[in-house]
Structures are given as C-alpha cells and as structure tokens.
Image: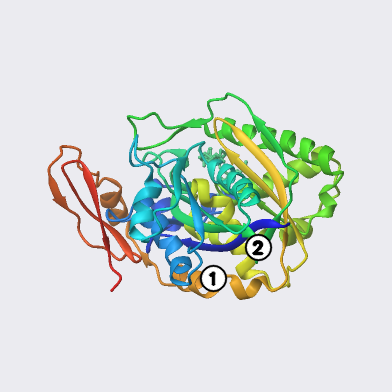
Amino acid sequence: MDIGIDRISFYTSNYFVDLKTLASARSVEADKYYVGIGQEKMGIPPPDEDVVTLGASAAWPLKRDGELDDVELLLFATESGIDQSKAAGIYVHGLLEMSPRCRTVELKQACYSATAGLQLAIGFVARNPGKKALVIASDIARYELGSPGEATQGCGAVAMVVSANPRLVAIDPECGYYTEDVMDFWRPNYRSEALVDGKYSTMVYIHALIESWRQYAALTGRSLAGFDRFCYHIPFTKMAEKAHEKLCRKFNEPLDSERVRILLDESLRYSRITGNCYTGSMYVGLASLLDTAREDLAGKRIGFYSYGSGCVGEFFSGTVQPGYRDFCCAEAHHNLLANRAELTYQQYEDIFNYGVPTDGGEYVFPQYKTGPFRFSGISQHKREYESLME
Ligand code: CAA
C-alpha cells in the first residue's frame, strides 16, 4: 500500500519587505541578498498573525474541501511555539471545528520536526489505512535587527494531509537520518529571536546531508542520478544550491549548472519571495515544485533533504502520482503571493518591535489583512482568536 502526501496547502503573511529596502537600510549592496544568498523578499507577519493563524489558514482550504473529515491525528510542527504546555495544534483543531476524535500533539526539533511529523503520520496510516493525518508546519523566522540572519527571515505554514493511496506524492520507506549534538542555531526560552553561528550552521547542514545520503544510498542502492528533482530544506535558496553541489562533488556525481537549475529551480521559487519558513520550508519547496513545474512530474522521483539545527538531518524520497495537478492548490498559492502588500522599512521595524503583552491584561490587537483567522487579542494570559469566515 502506498502512503504519502495526499494534499498540500501553503499560507504566508500578506505583507513582505523587499530585500532591496533592507539592503538600503543596512548599507549593503542589494545583490548580496538577491544573488549572494538568493533571496528577494521576506514575509513579515503582522501583530495579528502567529503560528496558529498561519497554520489554520494553510489548512482551511483542505477543511473546506472536506479533506479533513477522516483525520484522527493532527501533528503541529513548529519552532516558534506560543505556549510551553498547550499544543498550538489544539487551537487549530478548534478553529477548524475538527472532530474531537483526534490525537493532537506539537512537535519540536528546529526546522526538522515536520519531517518527523510526516514519518509519524505515515506510521499512523499504515496502522489505520482508512484514516488520515494532518501535518501542519508553521513558523516565523526571526533574527535580531541588523544581524547576518536578518535577510533570511520569513514566515509561513504548510498543511499536508497524509493518507493511503495519496494523490500527490507516495513516500518511499527507506530513509537516511542523522543526529548530532551541536550548537549551530538555537532559541532559549527567554528569547524571541534565534541565536545562530551562521557559517558553522551551513557546514553542519552539509555534514548531516552527506551522512543522511550515505545511509539512504546504502539502503536503496540508488545514485544521485536516479532523481528527477530535489527538495532541500531552504533557509535561503543559495544554501540548497550549494548543498546539492557539495553532495554531488562528494559522491562524484557529474554536475553542471544547467542540470542543477533543472533539479532545484522550481522548488526554490516560493521560498525566494517568502523567506525561511523553518519547519515548513522544505514543504513550501515541494508545493512550489508541484505548482510551478511545466513538465508533467507524474512518475518522477523526488529526493528530499530535511534539516533542523541542533541537529537532525534526514534524506528520503517519493514519487509524484499520476493526475497530481488536479489536487494542487497552485492558483490559490499564486494569488496569495501575488497580492501581498509591501512594507516600508519603518513599517517593518514597527511590526518587528510589536511584542505580545505579557502582563496578563486585556488587549485587542490592530486588524491587519490576514487569512480566514486572526490573533485578535490576549486576555488574562489567554490568546484569543477570531474566525473571519461567515
Ligand atoms: N553580490 C553578490 N554576492 C555577494 C555580494 C554582492 N554584492 N556581497 C556578498 N555576496 C555573497 C558572498 O560572497 C557570500 O557568498 P558565498 O557564500 O558564496 O561566499 C554570500 O553573498 C553571503 O555573504 P556573507 O557570507 O558575507 O553573508 P553573511 O555572513 O552576512 O550571512 C549567513 C550569511 C551567515 C548564512 C547568514 O545569512 C545567517 O546567519 N543566516 C541564518 C543561519 C542560516 O540560515 N543557516 C543555514 C544553515 S542552518 C539551517 O538551515 C536551519 C535554519 O533554517 C536556520
């Protein structure tokens, strides 16, 4: 029985900063961002979006289409958690009015945990073939103003239905995975911005890739030439390109820039204009690939590399299913990305500095443009959400 990704829906904030604007404020050349790290825009969440509203908005089109009716497992992956105890997925479960017969848990391991979610969901479906799982990856990537990581900020969420006989991508059983205790990127509980050893993090990303691939190749006998496309974790698009080049060099796979373009380019289109979505970013890459590839990808094998600092890496693979285009949300994704509003530098800084009050008082947040749900305020330390659906 094939098991894998049956549907995928992506959502990001309606606001962005062009990295030319940031470059001008930071007195660096715009090409450092546009060319050097391969990023053009960063998605910025207004004060009334958080990982709950991003995640619920990503899942909403699936709910509307009746795709969540048989879901009995909701796994919410994030590294921008809003509560030390309660799973963010429970708020989403409520906003989407899902069945109470549902296991709901939040997962954390930096940017990797959505892949843990996907693999756990596959195990659940193998045990309960008539049932489905909903995996939501939702994050806000935030670094200090003026830090090297600032230009890689972004936000977004991906909601994936995992089922038997999936209509998008059947996931292969073999995986290579790798854990090592390192401090390349982390966020202590008392901080709202991540700390990062930037150059070191890029080296650990690649080391974990090589080790994960080595295992996967030994298990499957496949070579890098046996893949039609790759989806990498995308902290910034240049990272994915460099990682692929390094992997090919390490394992003596011939490589030219046109081949790298064909293998990666379609998966990088959305991330280039949303910025890092942490747990969601590789899956934003998958949505981008399925939505924008001109070639019919049915029957094509995709290689996936998921990475979460700290660190865990995993290489796995999947095959695109016949008729997949009928089940993509390409038009909705295109409209969302095309209709965002650009922020000035000052608007960006004002939003960045708008902190969620922590004194237990009563607060109503200003209303910005959001999806179907908004984080409307906070009262006695309880987050309040509003559904904008009729
Ligand atoms: N035109 C063209 N290119 C230019 C340029 C210009 N005018 N100016 C600079 N560049 C190039 C540089 O040559 C460099 O290219 P190479 O990497 O090929 O040498 C590139 O632009 C970046 O320049 P710097 O190396 O000077 O950039 P930096 O040190 O200021 O920042 C970074 C780079 C350290 C990766 C920083 O973006 C960062 O800290 N990011 C956050 C951490 C991160 O994303 N790590 C990735 C791995 S960890 C992970 O994947 C988990 C996660 O999601 C965070």
Q: Is mark 2 within 8 Å of ligand 1?
A: no
Q: Quadrant of the N terminus?
A: bottom right
At 49% across and 62% down in the image, what residue appears? 10
Q: Nearer the viewer, residue 108 or 72?
A: 72
Asked if 69 appears above or below 45 in the picture, the reply is: below
Residue 44 in view:
no
> What is the three-letter code of the residue carrying label 1?
Cys
User: Closer to the camera, 128 or 77?
Assistant: 128
Between residue 96 and residue 363, name the one nearer to us: 96
Is 27 above or below relative to 69? above
Quadrant housing residue 141: top left
**Image x and y of residue 277, in percent:** 49, 50
Q: Amino acid at mark 2?
A: Pro
Total count of labels = 2
Query: Where is 48 relative to 181, above or below?
Result: below
The image position of residue 219, as x and y in percent, is: 82, 39
Q: Does any portion of residue 290 appear in the rendered image? A: yes
Q: Which mark is residue 70?
A: none
- Residue 34 higher or lower than 278, as above or below: below
Say whether residue 351 is left or right of residue 143.
Answer: left
Is the CB atom of the residue marked by disc 1 within 8 angstroms of ligand 1's nearest atom? no
Residue located beneath label 1 in the image: 329
**Residue at the image position 34 percent from the left and 35 percent from the top:** 85
| Label 2 Cα crowd, 10 Å radius (few <14 / some 14-19 / many 20+) | many
Find residue 306 and report its horizontal and vertical position in percent. 62, 44
User: How packed is label 1: few (under 14 Cα within 10 Å), some, or many (20 or more)?
Assistant: some
195 relative position to 170: left or right: left
* Residue on which the image places disc 2: 166
Q: Residue at x 72, y 51 (%)?
A: 317
1 or 2: tag closer to the N-terminus: 2
Locate residue 254, reporting x and y percent: 86, 49
